[in-house]
Amino acid sequence: DAMVIQNPRYQVTQFGKPVTLSCSQTLNHNVMYWYQQKSSQAPKLLFHYYDKDFNNEADTPDNFQSRRPNTSFCFLDIRSPGLGDAAMYLCATSSFGRESSYNEQFFGPGTRLTVL
Amino acid sequence: KNQVEQSPQSLIILEGKNCTLQCNYTVSPFSNLRWYKQDTGRGPVSLTIMTFSENTKSNGRYTATLDADTKQSSLHITASQLSDSASYICVVTTDSWGKLQFGAGTQVVVTP
């Protein structure tokens, strides 16, 4: 089945130790998103890629970076995780401009990040 | 101020009963409105999606309504099941490329 896959599902890192979260998709969607979701809060968009074009949200800290080496994969790099970065990180994809006029976003299961 | 407001914040219902969740939005321009179901520790899963010209849409026991004039939407859950326990999130799309404005969600707990 076509889907959005996130690895790992649970990630533990130490304060200040760089960490990378990965997302892959078999939907061949041209847009990929990264969201941060803290407990009992709505997901907050960090950035998105439209094809290879990177679009950063104005309030996304510099500590968060992203890479999209090809259509299928997208990575979230946290350069120096702080305690406040502990959260669920959600990857999503959509097919803007293609067969769907709704641009529906399909979410992965998320990666739960713990910072010790 | 959040442009998508949901109510109630949480509710508890007995298995088999119906319930209705509310969503009011001020997002403009409006592209479409979606309801997502998010189980604890999982990513959101789309239930329904509606454009401004659609008044109602169903997905099994879930029925969403939209009044684009009053900028209100509701999600009705019929004959609730234990598996309906989750957070239900109202999301409004404003930009053509699909940026989402999220509500804070309604936490639904279905008890036996």
Image: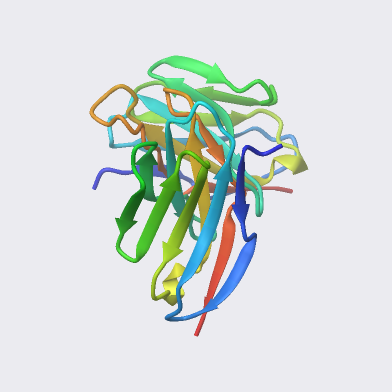
In the foreground, A62 or A22: A62
Taking the view exactly as shown, the residue that stands out farthest to the top is A53
Image vertical order of residue B20 relative to residue A12, above or below: below
The spot of residue B46 in percent (x, y) is 39, 49
Q: Looking at the image, can residue B55 be seen?
A: yes
Q: How many marks?
A: 0
Q: Residue at x 62, y 37 (%)?
A: B3
The spot of residue B38 in percent (x, y) is 49, 56
Q: Looking at the image, can residue A9 be seen?
A: no
Q: Residue at x 39, y 43 (%)?
A: A5
Image quadrant where residue B64 sits: bottom left
Q: Residue at x 58, y 74 (%)?
A: B12
In the foreground, A19 or B4: B4
Taking the view exactly as shown, the residue that stands out farthest to the front is B69
Image quadrant where residue A56 sits: top right
Colour scheme of the picture: rainbow
The spot of residue B44 in percent (x, y) is 46, 50
Q: Residue at x 50, y 64 (%)?
A: B20
The spot of residue A68 in percent (x, y) is 44, 22
